[in-house]
Structure formats: structure tokens, C-alpha cells
Image (tube, rainbow, N blue to C red):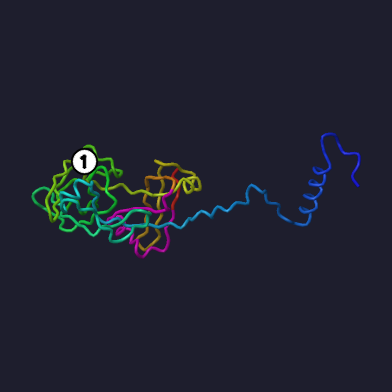
Amino acid sequence: MLSGLPAGLDRPSVERIVREIVLKSQGVALVAASHLTDEPALDLKLVVSISARHCHLTDEHVEKLFGPGRTLTPQKSLYQDGFYAAEETVMVVGPKRKMLPTVRVLGPTRKASQVEMAFTDGISLGIDLPVRASGKLSGTPGCVLVGPAGAIELVEGVIRAERHVHMSFAHAAHFGVKDGDRMSLVIKSQCGLVLRDLLVRADATSKLEVHIDTDEGNAADLDNAQSVELIKQA
């Protein structure tokens, strides 16, 4: 029986303190109730995807290229939820009529059309590609897009998309980064290399995924890589 309690301590408080001391002496871990949640563990599986040349279109340009009333037809879902490779392709025509005949369209549609390709593709087309974050199109070169129902001229919008990593805010907290920061990707293979300055693109729902282009993927022999790792840059 407990008597003569110190000032400020009631019987339940003393019993709780005694119980914790006994449990600790028996090697029993105490878990705070606030930590007992139903939240799933953070998925840290890293996917590194090679983005082959492709284009994004506005609704207006889809109709001009493929016909009135036409919408994109999903062919294959991409890793990020809600994004897909469409059945539709376009011809991309550069200066001096150099062309790439079948460039895949990705959906869904966007507010501005743009074409993304590797440096090697730019050389083939005769276009000096600037490295830009997706959507940052001001001052970029243009091209002509040709579809089965018509053609459009893009005054600007042809870029080499800078390498980047998609992640959720929870992933960003795990790595100690925020949207707009930079990270490095370590690829271990027979042609292993470190790709620095990946742009962090964090939002509420994205899965953990790095996007690099075909030149970068081939240089690192990504298909035969033993491991990939994301590292926060100093």
C-alpha cells in the first residue's frame, strides 16, 4: 500500500512510474501510444527510368495533329500514377528538314506542348538543345510536329530535360531534402558513374523515381547495373 506520497504525485502516477521501472529492468521496450499508427512504412524502393525521346501536347494540338474531337489513347501506364504512353506518335522535323519519324506522345495533355530528347537526338535533328526543367520553355528552340491529320509549328519547346528525381514529401523528409534541391545518383556497373545535380521534384503523392535520358542511361550501362543509390549533395 502506497502512503506518504510526494507533493504533486497522485497514486496512478506513482504506480505508472513503478511499472515502467520494473518493465525496463526486465528488458521490455516501452512504445509511446502516439507511435502506434496504421500508417504504412515508407517505400524506399528506387526506380531509375530512362526517358526516351517523347513529346507532351496540349488538347488543341492533339486535335490539330490527329483530328477534330480526338483525344490521346492510353497504351501503357507509366510508373507514376496517372501518367501513360499514348498510342499516338508524331514526326518531329528540325532545321534543314531533318526528322525523327515516330516520337511517342505521353499523356495526359498539358498547358504547353514540348518535345524532350537526348543530345544525340538533337544532333540528328540539327537542334542545339538547352538543358531545362520540364515546363521551363522560354527561349528554347522550336520544331515542326507532323501527325496524320495535320502539322503544327512550335515556336519554342524543344529541350533536353534535366535529370531529376520524383519523390513524395515523406521521401524528401527521409533524405533531408526539399523540392528544388539537388541530389546525386550513384550507378554501380561496369561503366559505373555518378550523376550529380539531379533536380528534386517533391509533391504529396509521387513515387520514388529518377528520370535520366538515353545518353545518360547508355553511358552508365544502366540495364546491367548492380545497384543504384541516391545521395544528398553537400
Q: Left or right: where does residue 147 sit relative to residue 47?
A: left
Looking at the image, which residue is at 17% across and 47% down? 127
Pointer 1: residues within 10 angstroms few (<14), some, or many (20+)?
some
Q: Percent from the top left, x then y, of residue 155? A: 16, 41
Left/right of residue 2 with respect to residue 125 in the rendered view: right
Q: Amino acid at mark 1?
A: Thr
| Camera-nearest residue between 19 and 141 | 19
Q: Is residue 86 magenta?
A: no
Q: Of all residues shown, which one is farthest toward the top?
A: 7
> Residue placed at 30% from the left, 61% from the top?
76
Q: Residue at x 24, y 54 (%)?
A: 72
Q: Is residue 151 above or below residue 77?
A: above
Residue 53 shown left or right of residue 93 in the figure: right
Q: Which residues are magenta?
A: 205-229
Seen from this angle, which residue lies furthest bottom?
224
The reply, left or right, for residue 3 in relation to residue 98 is right
Residue 54, percent from left and from top = 24, 54
Secondary structure found at label 1: loop
Q: Which residue is mark 1?
A: 140
**163 or 143, which lies in front?**
143
Return the x and y of residue 114 as percentages of the image width and height.
23, 46
Answer whether residue 212 is magenta in the image.
yes
State the count of labels. 1
Residue 7 lies, in percent from the top left, at 85, 34
Residue at 20% x, 50% y is 62
Q: Quadrant of the C terminus?
A: top left
Figure quadrant of residue 188? bottom left
The residue sitting at the left extreme is: 96
